[in-house]
Each structure stands twice: as structure tokens, then as C-alpha cells.
Image (cartoon, rainbow, N blue to C red):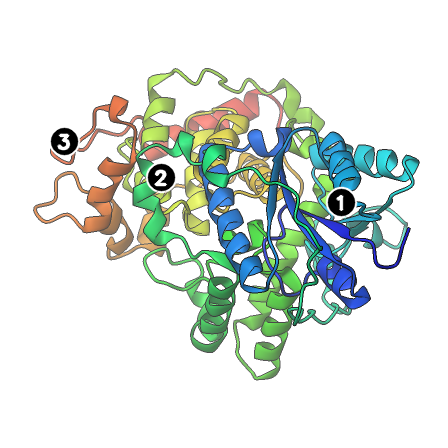
Amino acid sequence: MSDTSPVILWVRRDLRLSDHPALDATCEAGRPVIPVVIRDAVMDGLGAAPKWRMGLGIGHLAERLEAKGSRLLLRSGEPVEVLRALVEETGAGAVYWMRAYDPASVERDTAVKSALKEAGVEATSFAGHLMFEPWRVETKQGGFYKVFTPFWKAVRGLDVATPLPTPGRIPAPDAWPSSESLEDWALEAAMRRGADVVRPWVQLGEEAAQGRLGAFVAEKVAAYGDTRDLPWTDGTSCLSENLALGEITPRQCWHAGRRAMEDGKKGAETFLKELAWREFAYHLMWHTPHLLDSNWREEWEAFPWNEDETRPEVIAWKQGRTGIPFVDAGQREMYVTGRMHNRTRMIVASFLTKHLLTHWKIGMRWFEDCLIDWDPASNAMGWQWSAGSGPDATPYFRVFNPVTQRDKFDPKRKYIDRWIAEGRRHPSEEALSYFDAVPVSWGLSAGDGYPDPVVAADEGRKRALAAYENRGF
């Protein structure tokens, strides 16, 4: 391999230029960089909202690269074949990429690395989507952590690498290979009319992510420990959208949080814990990949979950029409913004899995289709945590009462009023947007009456506890 031969930069969930070890290594060597996004089975398997959001992120990154005198190539197909073809076309001597940790991506990347090395091409993966590689954080006995608190104690004092700057120059090849068109990929197709509703809520790209982080640290992090559970106020960082696609890195967030903590901002340590919780989800997904598709606790395999998605109460849950305002407000926030407040996610998930005794996988798949901040590890662990079947989960007997939760976290009904239109003389613009976002086939309008509860809060809790006791939990 020539020291001046191009390097193909395979871009995945790393839609940024700063703190990008694979890009930095290439630019440091002065070798031409050929960035490429490959539309493969992993991308095609995304739900409607995350696929659409991925398309927006790809388009934005392409613009940033062009401003640097570079380009972003688009190719479709099996990554092994696409990369082999690009190596042949360009004379590239290496392929670099940032690591992924979900089972499908690991299997894909392992096959790519093996095939490229066999062909005499350097194939190197770099860390960067996480702060701590999952195989490097171990218990004193040499195993992996299954409970968050000891995991947090193990990582909170570890050094986190200083984020890398944006390269001043990205060397370009003498000639650019052909590229497919992002418009032809039609990654927005499954979103239909919902795309126009959600788009104003998107904070697109690396610059927006950095702006979010800066504003959060300057204005919100001090009170974060108190406000992060209040869905009616703007008390969270909202960075999950950008972290999911690598428009910002966890170590950029970590160092900003550490500086805030050193400055005496009280809520900063809680923010750092939330970053560590994300790491914990990936730690568990790496060591126990069945987290994504099976009950993490084997004893839950015999639990009689409802798996019929056509049941009226499950359809009502998906539509945000359960008659339980806190639950419905959360679903509607998701349809309008592509996100859902974390406190509300817990209530919404608990209601489905406990009040309706419905399998967590149904809810997990629904979120996978609807969230622009969808993340494989966090989504799976969150659902299993709420259901009681996962690691470090909420106890089975803890059944969130959505009425008392509303009284505690939305006492003046500000959140509910913002997102529910029915029965209100002057509904908010956001509440009305829900009817523009959802499928026409649902046949819903703001003039409809608000539904009666599909199950009363107390009745649902009793039913859940009875089901657990009958199974010996």
C-alpha cells in the first residue's frame, strides 16, 4: 500500500467532522479521503422516522464536506461488494470506519474486515460512538456489569479522551467516483405526511448539536437534577437525537459536563450519569445481545404476554387514545416532534407492559418506527427496564400509576394541555399538529370526543400484580 493512496471513509452513525478518529487519522497522514455512505440491509431495516432522520443527516454532512472541498459518495448494496468495487475504482489502500456494537452491524463489519484484509487492503475500525469500549469495563472478577450503580462507580473516574478538533483540510482524490442520488434513495418515503410536521422540531447536524450542548450547559444543567423529570418544562439536553446519529459524541458531552461540575453546577453530575446510562445500555447489548429480541431474564420467557397487536386497547395505545391523558400526551408528543420526554417514556412503556400486559417487543418496535432519536441499545434496555424483564429493571411490583405520576410531574396539566386537543376550546398548535402527523387511515380529528380509559389506572395495576403473583414472581 502506498502512503499516498486514498483511504475510503465508510460513514455510518458518525455524521460529523469533529472528534472523528477515523477521519482525523486519514487527514493526519495527508492521504486523500473518499467518504462514502452505503445503503445496505442495516439501513433499509430502520423504522420510518429514524430512516428519514438518517437521510436528513446524510444530506447535511454532504453539504459540510463540500464546504471543505470534499464530497460524500452514496452507494447501495452489500458493503463487502461496494467497498471492493470502490477500492478497485480508486486504488484505495485502506478502508476506515467508526465501530458499531449491535449484533447485525458487528456481523457485517466482521465480514467486511475479513474480506478486505484477505484482498490485501488495510481495514481499520475506530472507537468513538462510546466513551468506554464494552470489553474494557470489567468487574473485579473479570465479568461484565449487570447493575448500573457499580458500573457507574467503575467508569466515573476513568479518563475520557479529549475530543479531536475538526480537520482544517480534508485531502481530496484526483478524481471522484460516481455517486448515487440521496433523492433517489427516498429515505423519507415511509414518513409520508408526518415528515412535514416533525421537520421543524429537528435540530440537524453537528453545528446544531454543539449549539444544543452549549445552551444546555450554560442555561439548564445547574437545575437538571430537578427539571429532567418534568415534561412540561424545557429541562433536558435533547441531545439524544444527535448522539444517535453521531452528530455529536458522548465524550464531547462528557467533557462539557465535567467542566460544568467543576464550575459548581449542581445538576452536572446527574447529566454525566445519564451519559453513563447510555454507555451501560451498549455494555449490556455487547455482552448479552439477546437484550434486543428476547427477555433478558430467562424467567420471563414463561410470562403470558399479550402479543396480539390488533387488540383495540393496543391500537388505542399506539394512537394516543387510551383515555389516560399522561400516556396519550406522550404518544402525541412523539408523533409531532419525533421524540418523547424520558419520564413520559417510562409511563407510556409501563402502561403498555403492565396495565395492558402487552409484550414489550410490541412497544419497542413501535418506538423504533416513530422516534428520530432511536438507538438500538437504549430503546431495548428502556423497554425491558420498564417491563421488569431486563437488567437492573424496575421491580415487577412497581407499576407506574399514570394518574399519580401526572399529579407529581405535571401537576398543573401543562404537558397534557400542550399535547391533547379534544375537549379544549382553544387547543394548542402542537396538539392540533398531531392530527396532521398521524395516518389519514386512523380517521381522527380534533373534533372527536376524548375517549374513556381503556382500563382504569387502579384496575390495571391490580390486574398486573395478579398476573405476576400467579407466575410466582
Neighbours of disc 2 within 10 Å: few (<14), some (14-19), many (20+): many
- Image quadrant occupied by the C terminus: top right
The image quadrant that residue 77 belongs to is top right
Does dot 1 land on a helix, a strand or a loop?
helix
Q: CA distance from mark 2 to mark 1?
A: 48 Å
Task: Give the mark toward the camera: 3 or 1.
Answer: 1
Question: Are the residues at dot 2 and dot 3 in contact (C-beta closer than 8 Å)?
Answer: no
Foreground residue among 149 and 468:
149
Residue 4 is situated, as x and y percent measured from the top left of the image, at: 84, 59
Amino acid type shown at disc 2: Gln
Identify the residue at image location x=7%, y=46%: 425
Q: Is residue 307 left or right of residue 12?
A: left
Q: CA distance from mark 2 to mark 3?
A: 17 Å
Q: Is residue 172 left or right of residue 321?
A: right
Task: Give the mark toward the camera: 2 or 1.
Answer: 1
- Using the image, tell me which numbered label, if any, was put on residue 449: 3
N-terminal of the pair, mark 2 or mark 1, is: 1
- Can the viewer see residue 399 in this picture? no
Q: CA distance from mark 3 to mark 1?
A: 62 Å
Identify the residue at image location x=14%, y=30%: 448
Residue 6 is situated, as x and y percent measured from the top left of the image, at: 78, 53
438 vs 304: above or below? below
Neighbours of disc 3 within 10 Å: few (<14), some (14-19), many (20+): few
Residue 247 is situated, as x and y percent measured from the top left of the image, at: 56, 57
207 vs 405: above or below? below
The image quadrant that residue 78 belongs to is top right
Q: Residue beneath label 1, please? A: 90
Residue 212 is situated, as x and y percent measured from the top left of the image, at: 46, 66
N-terminal of the pair, mark 3 or mark 1, is: 1
Q: Residue beneath label 2, please? A: 331
